Image: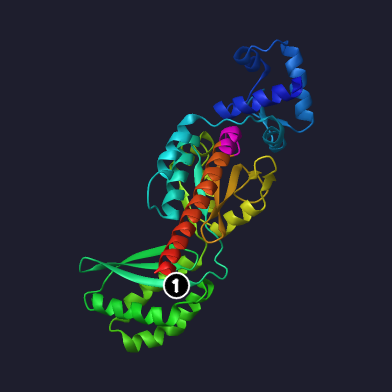
Amino acid sequence: MNRSEMILKLIVEHFIKTAQPVGSKTLIEEYHLDYSSATIRSEMNALEKEGYLEKTHTSSGRVPSKKGYEYFVDKLRDERVDSSIKFALAKVLDQKAQSVEEVIKQSCEILSNMTNLASVVLGPKVNEEKLVSIQIIPIGTSTATAVFVTDQGYVENKTFMIDEKTGIEEVKKTVELLNDRLLGTPISEIVPKMEAMRPALTDYVVGQDSIYQAFFQAFLKFAGERMNLYGRQKLLDQPEYADDAKKLRSLLSLLDDPKALRSALDEAKVDSSSDLSVKIGSKEKGLEDVGIVSAQVAIPGGQNASISLLGPKRMDYEKAMSLLSYVSGQLDEYFANEKQKGAQKNNGGRKKRSSK
């Protein structure tokens, strides 16, 4: 690392930590550099001319530009994974009989807590995934939960109130009809098929409208983008958003639009050394001052889910990339081991039956 790169690295790291523009005096006092103030200013001027630093209007100090962050991520960052995340994740993965969703949820909560960033999970695209099961679970006399399962093991549920005039038996009749008509249907085709079924439900089930609406809304969600967000509050604590309501609104609108978020992730640059995708700012509306680091995780069913850390462009990329790389790698290994255990169990069962 040459002198210019060292100064750029220190400026990026200091700005990430403080959110304050960095001057030559700060670098000398904080990092005890063995260079004169004039030498450091000359290097900073050169970095600014080359587009790696920017000068703010309110200070004589400099802040990293998009180009500066990208160079830092590509060439200057260090790998660092502390023992605390290894311990926390091991506790999650050591638990027995967990769903895919629960394992990913707990892992993302750990990531958000340790990076002070939001974590976003985008499930696999629906494509030709098919519905294989609809179940109804009564909860008391006036509430029930419907559970939907696909052939790839994805589970969605919807809890709803049961109208007094309807009753649980009418709900069960609805589920019987839906199972009869919808099982084996690609998820992408369920909503239009549901709309075509409405007249049949009217003839078959008393008070069907409230039941129909509950199931229809569940299927709309089921067929849409699968997105879960963790650590939203972490974003509100960042100085960029605490002091700028417009920036915060733009970011929150992105988080509320799964299609826009998936599009942003698809355009992110892939870091060849870590297989992570990195997006540092953009000309797109709402993404000008946003940083995104994402990784693919192979989940059961031969599909991938995307886990992303999202926050201000000033995010700690070293920490975010190191921790996300570690977590995604551990999840890949965990799900591969679970798949192998399942295959061994099935083979064992077949051997026992054949020996009888």
Q: Is the magenta stretch mostly helix, strand or loop?
A: helix
Q: Is mark 1 on a helix, strand or loop?
A: strand
Compared with 299, 6 (above or below) is above
- Visible residue check, residue 232: no
Task: Give the percent coordinates (x, y) of residue 137.
Answer: 29, 67
Q: Does the magenta stretch include residue 58?
A: no
Label 1 belongs to which residue?
Answer: 132
Asked where in the image residue 168 lies, by quadrant, the reply is bottom left
Name the residue at 53% across, 39% down.
244
Q: Where is residue 258 in the image (x, y as percent from the top left)?
A: 54, 57
Of the 4 image quadrants, the one containing the C terminus is bottom left
Please tell me which residue lies in front, 18 or 331: 331
Residue 125 position within the rendered picture, expressed as x and y whole percent measured from the top left: 56, 63
Q: In which quarter of the image is the N terminus?
A: top right
The number of numbered badges drawn on the structure is 1
- Counting from the top left corner in percent of width and height, residue 139 is at 24, 65
Q: Residue at x 71, y 32 (%)?
A: 75
Query: Which one is nearer the viewer's eye here, 44 or 71?
Result: 71
Judge left or right: residue 313 versus residue 204.
right
Q: Label 1: how many residues lie within 10 Å, few (<14), some (14-19) or many (20+)?
A: some
Looking at the image, is 351 positioned above or below residue 251? below
As for residue 314 lying within the magenta part, the answer is yes
Left or right, 260 with reference to 92: right
Residue under the point 59% across and 46% down: 294
Give amino acid for label 1: Val
Q: Quadrant of residue 281?
A: top right
Is 70 above or below relative to 161?
above
Q: What stretch is highlighted in magenta?
A: 313-322
Instruction: Decide if residue 333 is in sight here.
Output: yes
